[in-house]
Amino acid sequence: MNFKEIMLTNEVTEDTEIPLCPHCHTPKAVKMVMMGKLRLLPVMCECRKKEVEKLENAAKDAEFQEVVRSLRKNSLMDERFKDSNFKNVIVTDGNKNALKIARRYCTEADRMLSENQGLMFTGGVGTGKTLIAACMANELINNGYYAIMTSIVKMLDNGYRNEDEAYISKLNKADFLFIDDFGAERKTDYAFERIYNLIDSRYRIKKPLIITTNLSVPQMTQRIDMQTDRIYDRVLEMCYPVEITGTSWRLISAKQRYERSLKEVK
């Protein structure tokens, strides 16, 4: 009598052999008393369990990758930074501490999010602040978080004008908001008001803000005027300052290109 016939009859006794999988040799059924009779109930053998688990994981992975693609599409990040990752960053004395903090932040993303902890990368022009921030944003996106990376200048050019509340609401859907080149925008009442509204809204909904700026902490703690002071005070309250030092990467890159061109001429 085969397994199917046994399952459809009541002819099961204590002596009835439990069918085994011919591949993994684990049970394909268990004995169980049902309605006063001993019956065989089908179960998955170990190799079938692994097969089902593999299919489920593949489906979950495909679903997750679709989420990541959607997050990346909505990140507002410049195309040149969409493939940036920590592995491609050259470690120097000037950026190694910032890289360590950035990596740790991504590892502890859940805690950073729950505690509304932001970062502020400070340093001179071309020292790699934007690159490190982009690496962070991409790492967070790859881990399933919604990260947006933009700049005040881009925001003022792309909709942050007549529909302030709608635009802020869109940005605040992100788990992590990155603002590049903070402080580089034109110093106008119009710009100040919109910057403060965005930062303050982020503060009120308790979501992290990560910014890059050429401004130093001493510059930001100098009392200038009420408009500037209230923005800088709020940023310093939300964001832990991380300084990046060293020679401009743009100068280094220009020098390398020039040296390569000389070799090609020879």
Image: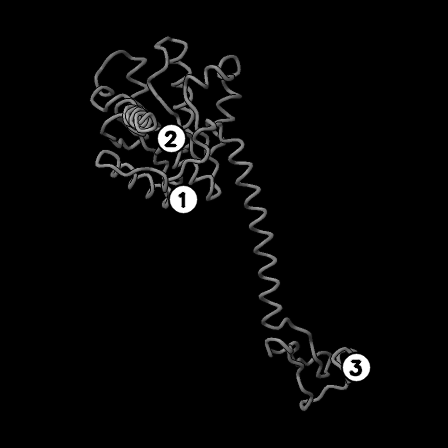
Image quarter where the C terminus lies is: top left
Estimate the x, y position of residue 73 in percent, counting from the top left: 54, 32
In this view of the protein, can residue 108 be seen by the observer? Answer: yes
Q: Residue at x 23, y 24 (%)?
A: 217
Q: Nearer the viewer, residue 173 or 184?
A: 184
Point out which mark residue 110 bears: 1
Residues at marks 2 and 3, CA–CA distance in whole angstroms: 67 Å
Task: State whether residue 263 is above or below residue 101.
Answer: above
Q: Which amino acid, by three-letter code, is at mark 3?
A: Thr
Give residue 4's quadrant in the image.
Answer: bottom right
**Percent of width and height locating residue 181:** 35, 22
| Residue 237 visible at all | no
x and y percent of residue 27 in the render?
62, 78
Secondary structure beneath dot 1 equals helix
Q: 219 left or right of 266?
A: left
Residue 133 position within the rendered picture, expressed as x and y whole percent measured from the top left: 37, 32
Classify mark 1: residues with Cα within 10 Å, few (<14), some (14-19) or many (20+): few
Q: Quadrant of residue 187?
A: top left
Above or below: residue 212 compared with residue 175? above
- The residue wearing badge 2 is 209
Residue 91 is drawn in which quadrant?
A: top left
Q: Which mark is residue 9?
A: 3
Extreme bottom residue here? 15
First in residue order: circle 3 vs circle 1: 3
